Amino acid sequence: MTIVLAAAEFAPFAKTGGLADATSSLAKGLVNQGHEVICIMPKYGIIDTEEYTLNPTFLTLNVPMGMQTEYAHLLRYDGGPKKPTYYFIEHDMLFNRQGIYGEDSEYFDNDKRFIFLSRAVFEACKALDITPDIIHAHDHHAAFCMPFLKKEYVLEDRFHSTRGIFTIHNLAYQGKYNPYRAMDYSGFGMKEYYKGSWFEHYGTVNSMKVGIMFADKITTVSPTYANEIKMHYYGETLHEELNTRSSDLIGVLNGVDYDIWSPQSDTYLSKKYDADSLIDKDFARQKLIDLARFSDSEKPIIGMVTRLTEQKGIDLVMKKLDYQISKGAMNFALLGSGQPRFVDFFKLIKHKYPSQTFVVIDYNEELAHTIIAGSDYFLIPSRFEPCGLTQMYALKYGTVPIVRNTGGLSDTVTEYEVANGNGNGFVFHNYNAEDMEYAIERALALFGAKDHWNKIRINGMRGDNSFEKSASQYTKVYESAFVN
Ligand code: ADP
C-alpha cells in the first residue's frame, strides 16, 4: 500500500514527547512490512538542517485556505533505501519559529498552522503525483485531514479510494479553536457547516472530535486506553463521540524502535549489554552515579524522565518523595520540564538532599538515555497514560518499572510474583499516594534479592514491544478500512 503519515512531530526532526517516537517508528515498521511510506510534517525553524539535509523539490504548493490561497515549498529528506521518505512543508510565516506549538505560551495561530498542514498534505500528494491508499493523520494537529478527505478531495480521482485513519495519541490535547476562524480557514464555512455538525463541540471547533468523527477508522495507542476513553473519567468530554464510533475504534500498542532504545544498540552507552550480559548494566549505572554524585552508590536508584504535568502523577510523587528519601533507602534521579509548581518542588528536594538526588530541569535526549539505562527502577505513576513509551524503554534496559495500572502501562507492565517468578515490574491501581508508596516499598524490598532481582529484570528485557509488531497490526487496520 501507499501510506501517507501526517503529523506535527516525527523523531528525530522535531520532538516534544512520545508522539515523535511513535510516528517515526511506525513509519519504519510500515516500510519493513513492504509499504511505500511518505511522512509529511512542517518545516519548523528548530529542525537541525546541518544534521539533516533537507533538499528542495522545487515544487510549490497552492493551498486553499478559505477564500485565500497560501503558497508553500516542499522539502525532502531521503533516509536511503528501505526507509520512509520525509517531506517538509515550508511556509516561513507559519512554521519558521523556535517552537513546535509555542514558546512561552501556545502560538495564537495554531488553528491556522495546523489546518494549513492538514490541507497541504493533499496538495503535496498532488504535486508529488502520489495516489495514497491511506492517509493516516496523527493527533489533533493533523485531524483536519479527515474532513478534507471526506468532503473535498474524495471528489478527485486521485483520492477517490483513499481511506482516512486517525490516531489519538493523547485525548487530553484536542486543538479547540475559535469557530469563526477555524471554519473560515478550513473553507467549510460557518453558515454551511458549523451548527450541530461534527465540527462543533461546546462552542468551539474541536479538532480531535473532527478527526474522530470523519475518519474511516480510529486508533489509539493501547488497547486499555481504547476502552478507558469511552468512559466519562478518561473521555475528556469526547466519550460520547468515542462510544458512537466504538466499532471503528481500535487500540494498537505503540512500538519501540530498538535501534535507538535498546542497551544492545544505544550509542550513548560506553558498554552495550543484553539479558545475557546484565552485569554490564553496571557501566550505565556507574555513569549515572558519577554524573549525579550520589554519595552512596549501593542504594537503589529510582529514575524518572517525564513531562512535569498532572497527567504524569507528579502530585502523588510530591506527597511521598520527601519522606521516602528522608528514610535514606534510595537515590532519586529526575529529568523533566513542565509546570512551575512541579519544577519548584523538585528543585527544593534537590536542595534538601543534595547527595541523594539528581534533578535536571531540561529537555535532553542523551540524559534521558543515561537515566533510563542507569537507574534500577523507573517510576511512572500516571493519572492516565495513553501508551507510555518510557516504561517499555526501561524494561528493555533492565530497569524495573513501578507504574499505575492505566492505559498502556497496564498493557505492558505486570506485577512481579515472588512465588512463581512471573511479572516484570510493580503496579498500583488507585490514583492514591499511599498505594504508590506501597508499590515503591514492594519494589525496593526486592533490590538485589538473590534470584528475584535478576529474574524480574530479565523478564522485562526479554519482552518484545517492537515496532514490527505494531506495524503489522496497523496494516490490518488499514486493510479493514477497505471492507464494506
Ligand atoms: P508523553 O508522550 O506523554 O510525554 P511517553 O512516555 O509516550 O510520554 O514519551 C515520552 C518521550 O519523551 C520519551 O522518549 C522520553 O524519553 C522523552 N522525554 C520526556 N521528557 C524528556 C526530557 N525532559 N528530556 C528528554 N526526553 C524526554
Image: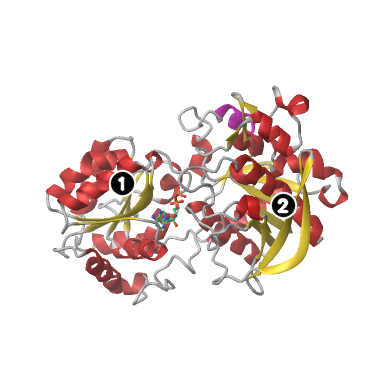
Q: What stretch is highlighted in magenta?
A: 239-245
- How far apart marks 2 and 1 lie (CA) works out to 38 Å
Residue in the image at 19% along x and 65% along y: 293
Label drawn at residue 121: 2
Identity of the residue furthest to the front in this view:
93
The secondary element bearing badge 2 is classed as helix
Q: How crowded is mark 2: few (under 14 residues within 10 Å), some or many (20 or more)?
A: many
Where residue 120 appears, as percent x and y from the top left, is: 72, 51
Is residue 199 visible from the viewing direction of this image? Answer: no
Q: Does the magenta stretch include residue 244?
A: yes
Q: From this view, report whether residue 42 is shown above or below residue 257.
A: above
Q: In which quarter of the image is the C terminus?
A: top right
What amino acid does circle 2 point to? Val
What amino acid does circle 1 point to? Val
Residue in the image at 74% along x and 67% along y: 57
Q: In this view, does 126 lie to the left or right of 249?
A: right
